[in-house]
C-alpha cells in the first residue's frame, strides 16, 4: 500500500508570536518550529498500517520553506520511507485552498492508495485542507477519525458525531482521511531511526500554488486583555454584578 501523509511545519504551541516588519506575516526569526500535533497522528497511523501489512511505502509531503526539511527528517526517523518538500517561504500565510492546490498537484502524480492529514494545523486552525485536498484529488473524505481499519480495498473508520455519538463510515480506497487525538499514540524517533533518516531521500520541488484567491492585507495581535475587576464578595455582590452585565457589558 502506498500511503501519503501531509504534514505542516508550525510554531511550537508555547511560542510567543510577533508580527513581521511587513505587517502581513509572522516574524519567524525567534520561533521554534514543530510538526503540527494532529499531523503526528496521521504519520503514526501510516507507519502502523505499513508495519501490520509487512510491506508498503510511506511518503511525507509538506508545503513549506527550506528549513522544513527538519520536520521531514523527524518523520523519516520515525519510520517513513521518503519525503517531498514543496518549497514555499510564505506557506504559513497561505489560504487553505492554495495549500490544497499545491498538495494535490504533487500527490496526484504519486497515485497513493491512501492520503492522511491532521484534522487541522494548530497555527491557523482552519481545518479545511483535508476536505479541499480530497475534492481536488476526486477522492472520498472522512474527517477527524479516531479509529481506522483497512480491508478489502476499503477504509472503515469511526469519528465523533453530534451529542457524544460515534459515527462509523466505510469508504473505498483511494481516500483522504484526517486524524485527531485518540487515534493512536505517536512514537518517538529512535537513535537507529535518526541515523537511518540521514540516508533517506527528500525530494524538493517548487510548489504549484495555482492562482491565489486570498491576499493578507494586514496582520495584528489582539488587544491586551483588560485587568479583572472585583466588585464584591458573596451574595451581596450579585445585584451589582447583574447591573454591570446589563448596563456596561450589555449582555443581558
Image (spheres, rainbow, N blue to C red):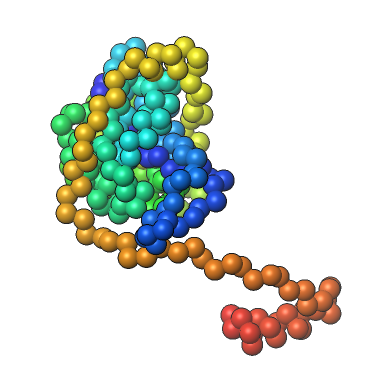
- Where residue 181 sits: x, y (%)? 49, 39
Q: Nearer the viewer, residue 22 or 236?
A: 22
- Where residue 220 sits: x, y (%)? 45, 64
Quadrant of the rendered image containing residue 240? bottom right
Q: Is residue 165 visible?
A: yes
- Where residue 115 sits: x, y (%)? 28, 34
Q: Nearer the viewer, residue 41 or 182?
A: 41
Quadrant of the rendered image containing residue 108? top left
Q: Nearer the viewer, residue 105 or 165?
A: 105
Q: Nearer the viewer, residue 6 or 238?
A: 6
Q: Is residue 30 left or right of residue 114?
A: right
Q: Residue at x 25, y 52 (%)?
A: 97
| Total numbered badges shown on the rendered structure | 0
Q: Residue at x 32, y 40 (%)?
A: 64
Q: Residue at x 45, y 57 (%)?
A: 19
Q: Residue at x 49, y 28 (%)?
A: 186
Q: Is residue 207 above or below residue 184?
A: below
- Where residue 229 sits: x, y (%)? 73, 74
Q: Is residue 222 above or below residue 51?
A: below
Quadrant of the rendered image containing residue 60? top left
Report the quarter where the C terminus lies.
bottom right
Residue reaching furthest to the front: 21
Amino acid at each position: 500500500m502506498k500511503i501519503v501523509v501531509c504534514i505542516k511545519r508550525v510554531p511550537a504551541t508555547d511560542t510567543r508570536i510577533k508580527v513581521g516588519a511587513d505587517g502581513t506575516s509572522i516574524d519567524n526569526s525567534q520561533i521554534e518550529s514543530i510538526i503540527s500535533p494532529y499531523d503526528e497522528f496521521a504519520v503514526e497511523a501510516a507507519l502502523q498500517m505499513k508495519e501490520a501489512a509487512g510491506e508498503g511505502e510511506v511518503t511525507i509531503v509538506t508545503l513549506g520553506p527550506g528549513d522544513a526539511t527538519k520536520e521531514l527528517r523527524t518523520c523519516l526517523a520515525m519510520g517513513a520511507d521518503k519525503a517531498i518538500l514543496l518549497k514555499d517561504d510564505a506557506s504559513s500565510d497561505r489560504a487553505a485552498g492554495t495549500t490544497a492546490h499545491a498538495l494535490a498537484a504533487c500527490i496526484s502524480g504519486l497515485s497513493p492508495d491512501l492520503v492522511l492529514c491532521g484534522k487541522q494545523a494548530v497555527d491557523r486552525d482552519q481545518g479545511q485542507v483535508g476536505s479541499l485536498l480530497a475534492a481536488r484529488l476526486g477522492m472520498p473524505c472522512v474527517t477527524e477519525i479516531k479509529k481506522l481499519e483497512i480491508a478489502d480495498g476499503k477504509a472503515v473508520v469511526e469519528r465523533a458525531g453530534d451529542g457524544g455519538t460515534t459515527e462509523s463510515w466505510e469508504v473505498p480506497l483511494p481516500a483522504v482521511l484526517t486524524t485527531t487525538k485518540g487515534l493512536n499514540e505517536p512514537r518517538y524517533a529512535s537513535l537507529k531511526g535518526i541515523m537511518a533518516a540521514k540516508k533517506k531521500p527528500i525530494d524538493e520541488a517548487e510548489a504549484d500554488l495555482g492562482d491565489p484567491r486570498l491576499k493578507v492585507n494586514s496582520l495584528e495581535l489582539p488587544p491586551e486583555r483588560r485587568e479583572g475587576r472585583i466588585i464584591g464578595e458573596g451574595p451581596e455582590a450579585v445585584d451589582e454584578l447583574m447591573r454591570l452585565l446589563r448596563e456596561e457589558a450589555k449582555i443581558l
